[in-house]
Amino acid sequence: MSGLNASLGYFLAVVIFAASVQIFAKKWPRFSFICEFASSFMLVACWLEVQTIVEVGEWAGGLGPDVTVTMLFMVLLTHGVICGKASGNPTLVVQKFLLLETTTLPTLLAVLAQFLGAHIACLAALYYWDLELTDMHMIKNLMARECSTSLLVSLRQGFFTECVCALIFHLVHLNLQARSALIRVPLIALLFTFLSHTARRFTSAYMNPSLAYGLTFQCPGFTFTEYALVYWLGSLTGMTLALLLYMGHIPRIFAKNLLYFQKTRFKVPKADKGEKKKH
């Protein structure tokens, strides 16, 4: 139980830090990319602790799978509430760019801030594990140098898994974007939890390039390029397909609708032959 209490304290500290940065950054809209930094930091830092509970807590702390799934859902739900529009997900930022909702420079700054937040979160987690507050964290500190990769299948299977999961996630996200946050945030958190838990024996379905970078790119088993192929290209491909299926085209690239033919709702009445002769 002490291990769980230490984890809850860690989660609380990360949430307070992220919320403080969000409040500070909202005063200067030009520096909105700082919100993406805080969002990515919170997501990666909390998920690293959830991953610790999954890997070690079951036999070192007596924490079962039901606890880890519940904690992951609560982390994602809290992240959605605290961070709001700052997703901490590069694919969602690129999606806004493709939808003409933002320009090039803000997109680049947001993506860079997200990866920086993920990197700082890894350093913060390592420092926390070094404190060895519980037996679980002591074991995790010893394991940190030889972490287990989340990619448990071949590159082809991994790419397909991330692509399909990202496709489902972004299709749902696009359909819910106009809904109230009271509906959207819990449903997105529930979907993310379900997909990640379902794909835990394949890629863990991160569907987030910066999250994957923070959680598994440092682990041995695959090269950086191979990880990027699965977790970056796979997620971006799934997002692009979702956008194409949802809208029929990608506004940033081409305006013509390739999938759906839009018919005019009202037909213009044709003039009678008798009227034409009078004129």
Image (cartoon, rainbow, N blue to C red):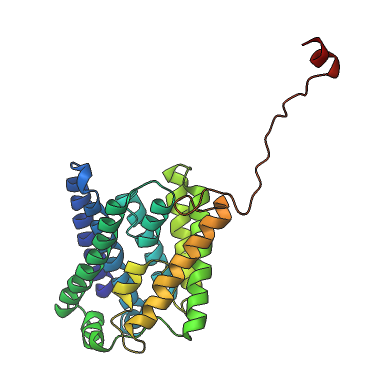
Q: Reply above or below: 117 against 32.
A: below
Please state the total of marks drawn on the protein image.
0
Image point (48%, 67%), residue name? 237
Q: Is residue 146 left or right of residue 160?
A: left
Q: Is residue 47 left or right of residue 34?
A: right
Is residue 64 visible in the rendered image? The answer is no
Residue positioned most to the top: 278
Image point (44%, 85%), residue name? 152
Image point (20%, 48%), residue name? 31
Q: Is residue 216 left or right of residue 186?
A: left
For residue 5, which quarter of the picture?
A: bottom left
Q: Nearer the viewer, residue 234 or 140?
A: 234
Q: Tell me the quarter of the image containing the C terminus.
A: top right
Is residue 279 visible in the rendered image? The answer is yes
Q: Tell me the quarter of the image containing the N terminus.
A: bottom left
Give x and y (percent) for residue 154. Answer: 48, 86
Q: Nearer the viewer, residue 241 or 53?
A: 241
Q: Nearer the viewer, residue 120 or 108?
A: 108
Give x and y (percent) for residue 258. Answer: 60, 54
For residue 41, which quarter of the picture?
A: bottom left
Image point (24%, 53%), residue name? 33
For residue 131, which quarter of the picture?
A: bottom left
